[in-house]
Amino acid sequence: MTSQHSHRKDEHVSLAEKFYTNDDTAFDGVRFINTSLPKYSLDEIDLSTQIARIPLRTPFYIEAMSGGSEHTKEINRRLALIAKATGLAMAVGSESVGLSDPSVSDSFTVVRQTNPDGVLFANIGANHSIEDAQAAVDMIGANALELHINVAQELVMPEGDRQFNFVENIGQIIEHVNVPVIVKEVGFGMSQETIAQLAKIGVESVNVSGHGGTNFAAIENFRRHSKDMAYLKGWGLSTIESLVEARSFNNQLTVIASGGVKSPLDVAKCLALGSSAVGVAGYFLHDIIHQSDDEIIADIKEWQYGLKAIMLMLNCQNVDDLQQQRLLLDPQLISYLNQRKLTY
C-alpha cells in the first residue's frame, strides 16, 4: 500500500507537469486603471500582509504540491530552501501518506529542517480525524493547517473516497487543533453558498482555489483505466469567479486565492478582488523541474519587484490599498455576476 501511495504522489507531480499550460486566460477578464502620476517611490511600497493571524512578508507563497516519496522529498527540500532565501511562506502537499507510513514522513519533515524559522502550512484532507489533523501540524511544526476539500478529485480518482463527512470534521478540527485552520479547495473553486456554510461552522480563513491551474479532474481521469470522465475537465469555478463569490464575506473571514496564478499581475488582481494572500503551485513546480534553485530565487525576487511596481502604478502603498482598487470587468464576467445576482 505504501509503495502505491508513493507512486501516486510521484504520478501526481509528473501529470501536473504534463498538463501544465500558460494558455488559460481567466485573469485577462479583469483589468486595472493605470495611474500616470504616482504618489509613492518604490521603496515606500509595503508587500506585507496577514492570513490566519500570521504575518507574511510577501502576499504570495508556495502553495501545496509535494511530499510522500523520495522524489517529492527532494522537491520539498528545494522548495523549502527557496522559501527560506526569499522569505516566502510554504505549504506542503497532503501529509496523509506520511501519517500512514512513517518511513516517508521525512519527505515532509525536511521542510522544517531546511527552513527552521519559516512560515509553514501543514496539509491534510477534511475527511481525516482531529488526531490526524494535529499529527499533520506536529509533523512539520506548522504555523497553520490547510484542510483541503476535494470532492471532484476524490470521485474521479480510481481509489478515491466515495463518501464525505467534511462539515462535521471541519468544525471539530477547528475547535481542537492548536493552530489556525485554512479550508482550501484544490482547483474547483468555491461558491458563496459553500463559503457561507463554512463561515457558519466557525471557519475564519478560506482558500477559494479555482480552476485554471493544476487540474486534478484531468490528472485523476488520466489515471483511470478507461479515462472515461474527461467531461469533468472544466468542472468548477475559476479563481476570478470564486473571488467575486467571496467578496461579500471579506469582512467576516480571510480570503486566500490560488489556481492558475502565473505572474505578479495575476497576484495583484487576486488581491484587488479581496484576497489577502495568493498561493502559487503549478508555476513553481514547473520551475523546479526546469530551472536551478538560484534561477527560481531570482525569478521570485523579480515577482516581488514586479508586484511593487504594479502597486506603485496604482498608487497603492500596501495590500490594504490594493484591496480597495476597482477593476474593469469583461462582458463574460459581468454576465456571470448578473446570473449569480452578485454585486461588485
Image (cartoon, rainbow, N blue to C red):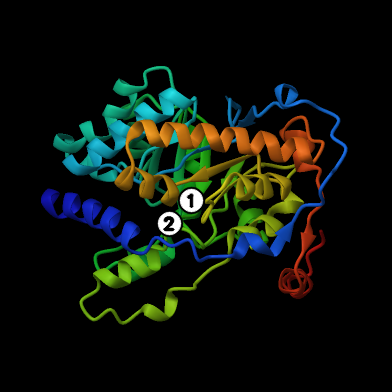
Number of marks drawn: 2
Q: Is residue 121 visible?
A: no
Within 10 Å of the Cα at label 2, are there few (<14), some (14-19), or many (20+) other Cα atoms? few
| Callout 1 secondary element | helix
**Is 218 on the left or on the right of 3, as rendered?**
right
Q: CA distance from mark 1 to mark 2?
A: 6 Å
Q: Position of residue 73 (x, y in %)?
A: 23, 37
**Quadrant in the picture for the C terminus:** bottom right
Q: Position of residue 101 (x, y in %)?
A: 17, 40
Q: Position of residue 328 (x, y in %)?
A: 80, 60
Badge 2 amino acid: Asn
For the point 23% across and 57% down, the residue is 11
Residue corresponding to mark 2: 165
Observer-nearest of 168 and 205: 205
Residue 52 picture quarter: top right
In contact (CB < 8 Å): disc 1 and disc 2: yes
Residue corresponding to mark 1: 168
Badge 1 amino acid: Glu
Residue 82 picture quarter: top left
Q: Position of residue 112 (x, y in %)?
A: 33, 24
In this picture, is 207 found above or below 102? below
Observer-nearest of 25 and 306: 306
In this picture, is 289 found above or below 226? above
